[in-house]
Image (tube, grey):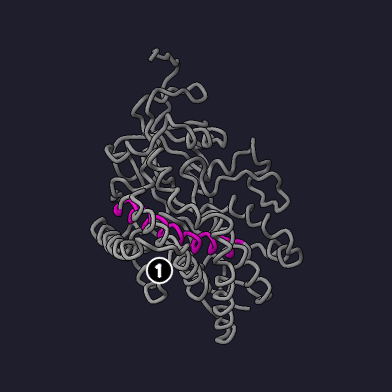
Amino acid sequence: MTEKTITGPLPPVRHWPALDLKGVDFDPVLTELMREGPITRIQLPNGVGWAWLVTRHDDVRMVTNDPRFGREAVMDQPVTRLAPHFIPARGAVGFLDPPDHTRLRRSVAAAFTARGVERVRVRARRTLDEMVDELLRIGPPADLTEAILIPFPIAVICELMGVPADDRQGMHTWTQLILSSSHGAEVSEKAKDEMGAYFRKLIDARSGSRDEDVTSLLGAAVGRDEIDLEEAVGLAVLLQIGGEAVTNNSGQMFYLLMTRPALADRLRSDPEIRPQAIDELLRYIPHRNTVGLSRIARQDVEIRGVLIRAGDPVYVSYLAANRDPEVFPDPEHIDFERSPNPHVAFGFGPHYCPGGMLARLESELLVDALLERMPGLRLAVPPSQVPFRKGALIRGPEALPVTW
């Protein structure tokens, strides 16, 4: 390889603390990093050293879709990170590169196509209607998070995964322990091991299945020797955990609609715009703290005049990309008419969130049900008194006190 010469000093390393942000406040450190340049260097609260941070929309899409940046090598480097513990299973799909990553994703692809997602629509709508019926029967005030925004996504992802109804609460408990950074590595690892053991038993029992739920698809793929059981278990755990992200996204979405009632009024008066409006809300809401998983440069790569050397860790910020003014004019403004809207709320490239279509479906069902059946829905406390999760990797309200 020819050595590249890039003049100029490296950008300073900026410490990025784990802030407990409330509401839909955008991370002020990320705002500063975006202003400093398209490519900066960061140090997160845990891990070792520093990493590059890419924030521009086009650069984020390039890095996430470029085979010169890989995930597998992250397993062998103590990369600076947000989480105090780092416990991925070797071979887990989130840390695989093509072609192994492609092979694993293919095994469950049918469940996440439009047809696969539509398969759960009718039952999901019925489940949600029953939850709203119960909420209306009990009457206000209520915690919307506890009554709807936690149990509904659990029911939907478990339906898609093929997890029996009696086991859903256990799945939720494990997920919360895995996603929280406040319990410590031992507790998170134990929860992940227990969830893995559960899925190992369920997938193994479905090795000859012809059903269309995820664990049946995985069991069948294992039975055909297309993937092994450990790979199937790792993928099931990742998909199950990811399914509950809808709780936090929806919590932020409804907090936003109730603190900006003109937006909710628009959705009530113009049902046709709801799918487009949900995409804009997904672009806008800051669904996570700092950044997710890093990549490692496999070779020297130049981005905007900055040389990223082979072996350097690189993070992308989807949140920053969704506020790139070159792609989203007036990005701080929520515009339900925004078109096109090439947001990257579900990621981009090979690691694009497989549940993106399912998450959109759930958001549409929630908006339809809650805005139409509860026209007076509003916060029961001042916005400043809504408690938001602390020490969590994914942001969202811990409780959403409402009345109607």
> Is 14 situated above or below 22?
above
| Residue beneath disc 1 | 163
Q: Image check: 279 left or right of 272?
A: left
Q: Position of residue 144 (x, y in %)?
A: 53, 73
Residue kind at label 1, given as amino acid type: Val
Predominant SS of the magenta segment: helix
Q: Nearer the viewer, residue 189 or 306?
A: 189
Q: Nearer the viewer, residue 103 or 278?
A: 103
Vertically, is 96 above or below 296? below
User: Which residue occupies 45% across, 63% down?
Assistant: 213
Queried whether the magenta region covers residue 284, the answer comes back as no
Q: Which residues are magenta?
A: 229-256
- Residue 371 image position (x, y, % from top left): 66, 71
Residue 73 visible (yes or no): yes
Residue in view at x 29 percent, y 53 percent = 230
| Closer-to-camera residue (145/195) | 195
Quadrant that contains the C terminus: bottom right
Q: How many numbered marks have been drawn onto this rendered protein structure?
A: 1
Residue at horizontal 40 percent and vertical 63 percent from the top:
209
Judge whether 178 appears above or below 226 on screen: below
Q: Secondary structure at mark 1?
A: loop
Q: Which residue is outermost to the right?
A: 269
Residue 15 position by quadrant: top left
